[in-house]
Each structure stands twice: as structure tokens, then as C-alpha cells.
Image: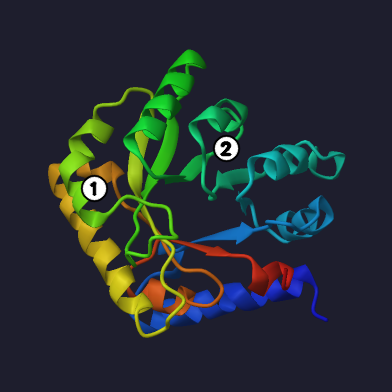
């Protein structure tokens, strides 16, 4: 079995290749290595191989892992990418560099409240349900367009872009990625400062190639780096 370092190198090479195929600069795509359910020892291997951006999906697992002695001496940029309840925000607010998964205005308001109390400015993304599946979290595309000004008005947090989890159907995913890219352009058209609203967090181990072709700026890859769960 290949090591984390070898799998990470292979993923980076693949990202570079896809970028060059579609005329993009590989530096435009940020790799988030998703360590959900994996031990801190594997995260350490990834960070020591140069992978500073690490994504986690569960609050308690994130808290345990980020405090693990295995990682204490390392610089890690933690991204929270899972569903986030308002009552859990207080536990992560000062420990992450970005929250990818705000899926309602009430949660954004709580994020703003907690950030303001800590005198922080927190970057976040809005999760959009591009597939229309009832089992998925996320704001609908129409709701995003209707409520976007309310998100921009919140203090101490910065809306940096959008996130989605595409349908597992490979025939549908490209259209959903394109939809998110189009929504970002509409969001930028009403943003107070469009230059800060640039991120598209889309694409995972099974579909990141199509996501990059559609304009993804962040791909969240776990299995291809850390192995199957």
C-alpha cells in the first residue's frame, strides 16, 4: 500500500494535470486533505509532506484531533467542512481558518455573534444544495439569491464563496458544478466587495476532475489521500 506522502503526491500531480488540460494555473486550486475518521498520526504524515490545509467534518472529532499531542508542534490550517449546528459553533470558532458549510442564515448569525465576541474575523462559505436532493444540507439556489444581502450585512464574518456536494451520479455532477459557478458570479454581482467573494469549494475524491474543469478553487479530498474509510 502506498504511503500518505505518495498518495498525496499522486493527487497533486493529478490536479496539476487536469489544470493544464483545461488551461488553468494549478496554483488556483487549493487542496483540502480530508482526514475524517483517520488518526492524527496520518494527519501528521500529510502535514510533514507539505499539506497544511486539513478538513474535518465532525466537531468532537475535530476537537480531539486538533488537540492531539501528535500534532501539537505542527502548523495546520483547519477547515471545518461538515454540517455545523449553531450550538456547536462556540467550540470551533477560534480554531479553524474557514467554515465551508454554513447552510442557513440563523447559523451565519450565530457565527457572526461568536466571532464578534472573540474579536475575530472568520471566513466562511455558504453550502448550496445544487442537486435538489432532500437528504442533503444546503441552501437552495433561489434562496441564496433571495437572502444574499442579509449574509453580507453580518459583522465579524466574511462570505468568501460557495460550497457544494454534488450528486454521486457522474452524469449530473458536471451540471451541478456549473450551476455553483454561475451562482458565484451572481453573488459577486451584488457583493459589496466582489474581489473577496472568489471561492468555489467543490469536488471530492470521485469527482474533483470535473469540479476543476468547472472552476473549483478548493477540492476536498480524503479517500485518495488517506485511504478508504
In what quadrant of the picture does the N terminus appear?
Answer: bottom right
Number of numbered callouts drawn:
2
- Return the x and y of residue 70 as percentages of the image width and height: 85, 45
- Return the x and y of residue 54 as percentages of the image width and height: 63, 52
- Return the x and y of residue 109 as percentages of the image width and height: 37, 27
- What residue sits right under mark 2 in the picture? 96
The residue depicted at 53 percent of the width and 39 percent of the height is 97
In what quadrant of the picture does the C terminus appear?
Answer: bottom right
- Return the x and y of residue 223 as percentages of the image width and height: 66, 71
Q: Nearer the viewer, residue 208 or 136?
A: 136
Considering only vertical position in the picture, is 188 above or below 42? above
Residue 74 appears in view = no
Residue 107, image quadrant: top left
Marks 2/1: CA–CA distance = 24 Å
Secondary structure of residue under mark 1:
helix
The residue depicted at 14 percent of the width and 43 percent of the height is 190
- What residue sits right under mark 1 in the picture? 144
Q: Which mark is residue 36?
A: none
Name the front one of labels 2 and 1. 1
The residue depicted at 40 percent of the width and 72 percent of the height is 212
Secondary structure of residue under mark 2:
loop
Amino acid at each position: 500500500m502506498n504511503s500518505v506522502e505518495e498518495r498525496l503526491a499522486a493527487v497533486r500531480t493529478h490536479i496539476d494535470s487536469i489544470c493544464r488540460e483545461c488551461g488553468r494555473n494549478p496554483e488556483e486550486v487549493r487542496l483540502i486533505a480530508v482526514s475524517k475518521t483517520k488518526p492524527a498520526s496520518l494527519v501528521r504524515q500529510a502535514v510533514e509532506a507539505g499539506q497544511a490545509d486539513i478538513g474535518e467534518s465532525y466537531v468532537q472529532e475535530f476537537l480531539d484531533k486538533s488537540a492531539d499531542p501528535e500534532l501539537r508542534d505542527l502548523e495546520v490550517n483547519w477547515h471545518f467542512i461538515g454540517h455545523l449546528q449553531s450550538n456547536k459553533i462556540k467550540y470551533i470558532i477560534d480554531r479553524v481558518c474557514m467554515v465551508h458549510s454554513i447552510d442557513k442564515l440563523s447559523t451565519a448569525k450565530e457565527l457572526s455573534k461568536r466571532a464578534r465576541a472573540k474579536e475575530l474575523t472568520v471566513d466562511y462559505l455558504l453550502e448550496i444544495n445544487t442537486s435538489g436532493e432532500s437528504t442533503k444540507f444546503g441552501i437552495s439556489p433561489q434562496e441564496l439569491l433571495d437572502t444574499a444581502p442579509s449574509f453580507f450585512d453580518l459583522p465579524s464574518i466574511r462570505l468568501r464563496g460557495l460550497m457544494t456536494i454534488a450528486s454521486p451520479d457522474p452524469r449530473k455532477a458536471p451540471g451541478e458544478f456549473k450551476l455553483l459557478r454561475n451562482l458565484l458570479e451572481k453573488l459577486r454581482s451584488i457583493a459589496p466587495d466582489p474581489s473577496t467573494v472568489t471561492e468555489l469549494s467543490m469536488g471530492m475524491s470521485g469527482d474533483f476532475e470535473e469540479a476543476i474543469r468547472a472552476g473549483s478553487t478548493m477540492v476536498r479530498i480524503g479517500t485518495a489521500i488517506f485511504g478508504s474509510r
